[in-house]
Amino acid sequence: MKMNLKYFPTLFSISFLIAACGSNDKKTTPSPQANTAQPALSLEGYIIQSRSINDNIEVPGTILPFESTEIHPEISGRIVLLNVKEGSFVNKGSLLAKIYDGDLQAQLKKFEVQLGIAEQSEKRSAQLLKIQGISQQDYDLSLLNVNNIKADIEITKASISKTTILAPFSGKLGLKNISPGAFVTPATIITTIGQVNQLKLQFTVPEKYGTQIKNGQDIQFTIDGSEGVFHAIVSATEVAIEENSRSLSVRAIVKDRNPVLIPGAFAKVKMILGKNENAIMIPNSSVLPQGRKKIAYVYRSGKAVVADITTGVRDSANIQVLSGLNTGDTLLTTGILYLRAGSDVKLSKIK
């Protein structure tokens, strides 16, 4: 018996469709595990309670000399005397350097001679004026000449005084930057001087603490290389908050005198800004940053609930919560990295 080949493609197509439908039925069969619910996470909780804390902040600072300046000459000239002993203490008004003033001294003598002649001429003009031998205008011109020469003498004396460079205050000299015989200008730094028998401390505090800084306030600070705790008294604050850093500059007078306190040294400043009787403190590890905000997870009716929080001061273990949490809330403290809002939670331990 022969098969009619013209019907063969049609039979093949029907068989293929039947096989495909059977395959789809197998794939769409639901798995018995698909509807299995995730088990609740077993986590530890912490019941939030208020407590009394001191509002402390720790900020970096710098130790400064009480007064400090660079020593510049006021005029240009050649150094003929240099009395700068590096690292030595000098008193206010001590001679540090001398600039050549021979030309100015010669000019001064010239003006003094001219003054003598002009004064004699003025006296003769005054006598002639009494007998009406000259006019008042002629006498006034001779008197004007006398006064002009006197002014030139004063200017020359002032220039001569500028050739002597004196210590502006008592203090310790730094390193010298020139040698005797050097030609100097007002831009030349001869040396530096600092008043180091009394020191200042400069630091900045965040904007939100600016109103709590008062003159006379006591602060503590430490420095690297010393285990001692030093004290200072706030003396002044800047008139405005710095725009870029949003912080307020503060200066304090150091009360201690210790060889380890060297100008320019880095200091860690600690300040007590007040006492909060009802502060909420939670473990640092229970706070999660999310972009510009911070969150924590709270246990409520078997679920993990997200709380947006704002924080304040912190210590090595805890951080203050200013808003977002209340006393009596149960804070989740373990496994928070695996939590999502609405996750099922059961408490294994409550502190």
Image (cartoon, rainbow, N blue to C red):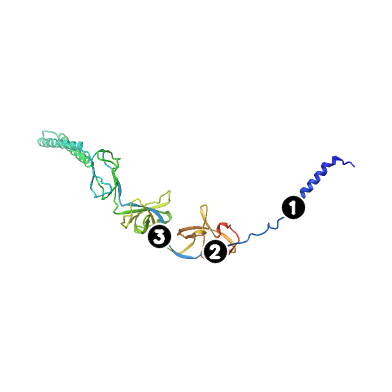
Relative horizontal placement of residue 39, taking residue 218 as reference (left or right): right
Furthest residue toward right: 1
Say whether disc 3 or disc 2 marks the residue closer to the N-terminus. Answer: 2
Of marks 1 and 3, the one in the foreground: 1
Say whether disc 2 or disc 1 marks the residue closer to the N-terminus. Answer: 1
In the picture of the structure, the residue carrying the numbered disc 2 is 45
Q: Quadrant of residue 159?
A: top left
Residue drawn at x 79%, y 46% is 16
Of marks 2 and 1, the one in the foreground: 1
Crowd class of label 2 (few under 14; some 14 to 19; many from 20; radius 10 Å): many
Label 2 residue SS: strand
Which quarter shows the N terminus? top right
Q: Quadrant of residue 220?
A: bottom left
Visible residue check, residue 329: no
C-alpha distance separating marks 2 and 1: 46 Å
Label 1 residue SS: helix
Q: Amino acid at mark 1?
A: Lys
Relative horizontal placement of residue 255, taking residue 137 as reference (left or right): right
Residue 149 at x, y = what percent?
18, 37
Residue 105 at x, y = what percent?
18, 38
In the picture of the structure, the residue carrying the numbered disc 3 is 273
Crowd class of label 3 (few under 14; some 14 to 19; many from 20; radius 10 Å): some
Say whether disc 1 or disc 3 marks the residue closer to the N-terminus. Answer: 1
Q: Amino acid at mark 2?
A: Gly
| Residue 230: assigned label | none
Residue 59 at x, y = what percent?
41, 55
In the picture of the structure, the residue carrying the numbered disc 1 is 26
Crowd class of label 1 (few under 14; some 14 to 19; many from 20; radius 10 Å): few
C-alpha distance separating marks 1 and 3: 72 Å
